[in-house]
Image: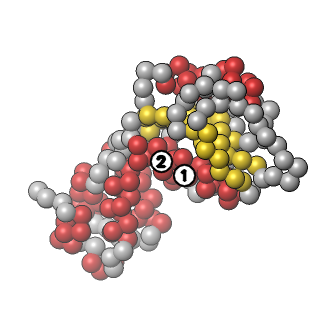
Amino acid sequence: MKLDPINILLNNNFKIEKKFYFISGNETTLIEKIADTLVKQCKKREEVNLVRIDTIENFIDEVGLFSNKKIYTGKNCKGVNIENLNKIRDSENIFIFIQENSPKTKKIKNIFIKDSDCCLIDCYEIDRTSKIRILKEFIQTNNLKIEDSLFWILVEKLDNRYVFLENGLNKIKDIEQKDINLKNIKKLLTIDGV
């Protein structure tokens, strides 16, 4: 299964329903945001412990009588293959693997797309359509009124990397509604050429 990272970020009711997640791509700020969001969503639902691992090769799931469910996160995909996933499939825990694109991720991505217990989340720079969705959601959530011309300027000028886009939106949120105009937005976001 493959999920759109923007859908995860914009859906406050997103639920962790898979056992294995593979977050990949070339936009590291979005990769980190998705990993954090998955962990937070899981923590909302139940008490879990976060455990960092290096590999799932020879992984032993240590279960205690009164221990909480665990979320294992790995910053690389070392040992991720069908055989090793099958060994830990019966675990009650959740596994999140994070790896920037590389030649070795293609094979793993294919596994995660085909396996019903797995989810692939590819993270790339935000395209125009996604930026429009994020900006509309931001305006609605914060009850802002922005002129159409300013909206389209923001779509063009806000950064395509998620953390920088989010920082720009947070700056806008912090100013008063009456001050949301082109002149102030240009100063606030250091936008030139508009």
Q: Residues within 10 Å of mark 1 (few under 14, many from 20)?
A: few
Which is more toward the observer, 102 or 182? 102
Image x and y of residue 30, in percent: 43, 46
Circle 1 — which element?
helix
Placement of 130 over or under 90, stated as above or below:
below
Residue 104 has which mark? none
**Which quadrant of the figure contains the C terminus?**
bottom left
Q: Give the side of residue 88 with respect to residue 21, left or right.
A: right
Residue name at image x 41 percent, y 43 percent = 28
Q: Looking at the rendering, which quadrant does residue 41 occupy?
A: bottom right
Going by the picture, which residue comes out furthest to the right? 65
Which is more toward the observer, 140 or 124? 124
Q: Which residue is mark 1?
A: 36
Q: Looking at the rendering, which quadrant does residue 40 occupy?
A: bottom right
Q: Is residue 113 visible?
A: no
Image x and y of residue 60, in percent: 75, 33
Residue 32 has which mark? 2
Whether residues under marks 1 and 2 lie with C-beta atoms below 8 angstroms apart, the answer is yes
Residue name at image x 65 percent, y 50 percent = 50
Q: Residues within 10 Å of mark 2 (few under 14, many from 20)?
A: some
